[in-house]
Image (spheres, rainbow, N blue to C red):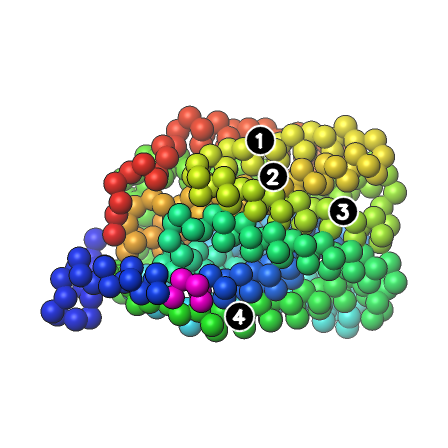
Amino acid sequence: MSTSPAPSRVKSPEAAEEEFHREVESQLRRNYAAHLAHGLLGQTGFRLIHAPTFVPDYLFALSGSELAVGAGRALQSLGMFLSPVIGATFIEHRRRVLPTGLLVGGLMRVQLLGIALAGLLLPAREALVATWIFLLLFGFFLGIQGVVFNFLVSKVIPVHRRGVLLGVRNALSGVTAAGVGALGGVLVARHALGNGHAATFLLAFGLTTLGLAMLLFVREPAAPVVRRSSALLPRVRELPGLLRADPGYRRYVLGRALGTAGRMAMPFYILHAATRTEIGGAQLGLLTAAFVLAQSLGNLLWGIAADRRGFRFTIALALGLWMGAGLLLLAAQGFGTVFLAYLGLGAGAGGFQMSAQNLVLEFGSRPDLPMRIAVASSVAELAGALAPFAGGLLAGGWGVPVVIVVAVACQAAGLFTIVLGVDEPRRRPRSP
């Protein structure tokens, strides 16, 4: 591995590393607060987009096609598959990555504005195509942002403090997102601005933009050691070696991808729920509120457990809960059972996502961390890109219940891969 030493020729690598950790500790309160504020506003808005309610319902309203719903989520995941390695190559030689995060975060939010304006200004067919394009671009920039943001967190928040931070951040944003989700249901029911879905996406754009501004308060220390700048293709050729070098990491990547494939059912949960109970604007808002509130408050518990037992422990529990909630939705009769299932879906899916994104930060050394994040994200999002499209085909040919059953099978495979094949990285010797 080719790396760049600390800027000072006087300091030894050990001294530079110690100075880095002292700066992390000195800025911890400020960075902790900035990340909480960023999450409170940003996650509140993004959950209106990621929740399996508003976007799938909107795509189905525009097209009347389950395949069109699956295609929308598949395009978003395709973008998230294509970009993480690009993002890692762009930042792994930089001593500070926050400026890149602000730029890419802004580009993400432009796509949300585009989805909202397309719904307000374009006819249904053109709005559908525009929404697909914006979801693809949103996923592309989200893939880069995921690498940048997770690497930033790994630098400014010590490993034993991350779980509670992410849990509290998600819990706070969940409380607000539940209220905003209910408000979105009202906007849809009342056809606000002539298109209630577009009005909801416009609200998401405003909240996420305010959240991005909170990152201006972060104080990021310069990394003491980074890789030398490298072109994209040479780095891509090194990826098989990165996977071969660590069997535990390799199995984590596979298990995460299998669990992520379970997202094929996400866009179709609401379509199946509509066959079990009446779903109007009010019910849509309540189910969104249930999903995001359970996701957020659940993440508080997942975070506490992760600080004590590790993210490997919580990823397994979360996958089990997600599977059980999907089976409950299959058997639901009436709105009450559907509501309960959505609570489980939110807590399980949220716990899996948080745990999967943070477990990767504990493998290996810091200079290779951006690329490890990128590889895990790209492989997971490849599964996430193919799965919703496959779900659309399954739903069109065999019905939505089959999609949910196949999703549960993928989650079960991911669970067994992680439990049986991945060691606890916190028990490994510490790497700089």
Secondary structure category for the residue under label 4? helix
The quadrant where residue 183 appears: bottom right
- Residue 313 appears left or right of 335: left
| Cα distance between the residues tagged 1 and 2 | 7 Å
| Cα distance between the residues tagged 3 and 4 | 29 Å
Instruction: Give the mark nearer the N terminus: 3 vs 4.
Output: 4
- Of badges 3 and 4, the one in the foreground is 4
Instruction: Give the mark nearer the N terminus: 4 vs 1.
Output: 4
Instruction: Give the mark nearer the N terminus: 1 vs 2.
Output: 1
Q: Which residue is mark 4?
A: 214
| Amino acid at the residue labelled 3 | Leu
Residue located at (85% from left, 52% from top): 282
Considering the whole magenta stretch, tell me its main secondary structure: helix
- Of badges 4 and 1, the one in the foreground is 4
| Cα distance between the residues tagged 4 and 2 | 28 Å
Q: Is residue 331 magenta?
A: no
Instruction: Give the mark nearer the N terminus: 4 vs 2.
Output: 4
Q: Which residue is mark 2?
A: 348
Residue range in magenta is 27-31
Instruction: Give the mark nearer the N terminus: 2 vs 3.
Output: 3
| Amino acid at the residue labelled 1 | Gly
Can residue 270 be seen in this snapshot?
A: yes
Q: Which residue is mark 1?
A: 320
Q: Nearer the viewer, residue 159 or 132?
A: 159
Q: Is residue 19 above or below residue 299?
A: below
